[in-house]
Image: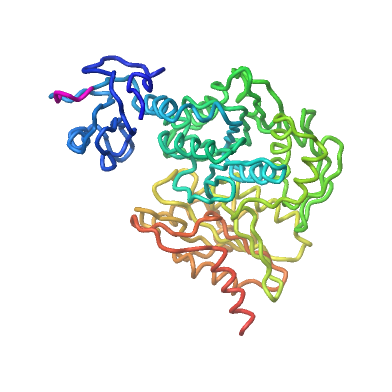
Amino acid sequence: MAKLQDILYKVRIKEVHGSTNLEVNAIQIDSRKVLKGAVFVAITGEQQDGHLYINKAIELGARAIVCETLPTLLNDGVTYILVTNSNEAVAYMANQFYDAPSSKLKLVGVTGTNGKTTIATVLFKLFTQLGYTCGLISTVQNQIANTIIPATHTTPDAVNLNALLRNMLDAGCTHVFMECSSHAINQHRITGLHFTGGLFSNITHDHLDYHKTFEEYIKVKKRFFDGLSASAFAISNADDKRGAVMLQNTMAKQFYYSLKTMAAFKGKILENGLQGLVMLVNDKEVHFRLIGEFNAYNILAIYGAAICLGEDSQTVLTVMSMLTSAEGRFDYTISPNNVIGIVDYAHTPDAIENVLATIKKLRKGYEQVITVIGCGGDRDKTKRPIMAAAAAGLSDKVILTSDNPRTEDPEEILREMEAGLNTAAKRKTITIADRKEAIAMAVQLAKPEDIILIAGKGHEKYQEIQGVKHPFDDKEILRLLFESTQNK
């Protein structure tokens, strides 16, 4: 329970109708979940407008309504709060309702296009090994110490996020590592949270279906760092051309990591193979189990965060040398006849190029690289031809297939991907809409020592078609197909 007037602290209020001196027992943004005594916040989303469900929320027992547009008729006994921005309002309200849990934790946010999940997950593993009780909020899963909670969004909505942080605090967590997606930043899901530090990985072509322009996407990412306090730290990738832009206006203490230039956290790759990376990290030689140049950058970001959080350099590097990546990130398996299968979440042109560039460096020279790739439906269409071209440019054979078509026609998505292929690329490309058949074709085409990359879905255990999530696990399907080739 909390006083409505107390949880409205920091909310930009335009009008109040009724009393704010009343107790509320919950905050809801979904009218269907409203119970007696709740405050309902009407949010205008991409799919639904919460203002249409204000009366339903009142019927279910809402004591107060927070909205951007007042209903024509106001009910007696119900308090109405007119605000500038409902998304922002609910974030501040949830923070106050759950007694500002983030201010009592060491909360580190990770943003960027690629690498967020790996950085957040390995930081969680690292600090757990260092003896802390930790929380993780990521695309793959949310975790409170040893308890795993399935994730539905990269970053939960503001109410669920603050509730989760409260549960983490109550469970004894001292450190929480969280992915901060551009959607979450733009929709104020993380507004009002107190971050101990922030990390920037990189920024490339993604989510233009939502942000419309690349410049807007950059601005949204930058907003995260603009909001950090002077007591926080901000760590950015010096080798990304927008790395310095991200920290231009932050009040936080600034640090950079780099493989190419001088930086507080400097790395150099000595060896890069399927056994992992051998690197110099600030002149200390370390063998890591993570693979590829893109993971070298992730390692430096993780190391930098640990140092900024006050940990001992040698201890951190020793523990990091034993850690593995997140599920579905360069996740590889080898068939009985020595075909290498790699499952990776790469779903942007830059991520595809990074993974295939890493594979190229692992080749001895004669193996084929066979890439199975699709593009998600109801998402950024402009990257589809670029994704296909990137895959074809760095592979010997490409199989275009479905990812999560969602409500779109899979064949139309494939046609849009094919538009990016030149004549030479088309000659080495096959199109198979059924993803399982596409993976089976890759296995059939592969000879011993060849490398199969299955890109786009990574850790996901489903394929979404016309609003229905069907069980589908790239890694499990690949494993079964590898087993069946052994039995032939």
Q: Position of residue 348 (x, y in %)?
A: 55, 46
Residue in view at x 21 percent, y 32 percent: 54
- Residue 159 lies in quadrant: top left
Residue in view at x 38 percent, y 23 percent: 7
Q: Quadrant of the C terminus?
A: bottom right
Q: Nearer the viewer, residue 406 or 110?
A: 110
Residue 436 lies in magenta, yes or no? no
Q: Is residue 253 above or below residue 27?
A: above
Q: Main secondary structure of the magenta part?
A: loop
**How is the structure coloured here?**
rainbow
Q: Quadrant of the N terminus?
A: top left
Q: Position of residue 70 (x, y in %)?
A: 21, 23
Q: Position of residue 5 (x, y in %)?
A: 33, 19
- Residue 188 lies in quadrant: top left
Residue in view at x 54 percent, y 42 percent: 137
Read off the magenta span: 74-79
Q: Position of residue 186 (x, y in %)?
A: 45, 30
Q: Is residue 132 above or below residue 4?
A: below
Q: Is residue 68 above or below residue 398?
A: above
Q: Give the total number of marks visible in the rendering.
A: 0
> Quick check: 183 left or right of 119?
left
Residue in view at x 54 percent, y 71 percent: 440
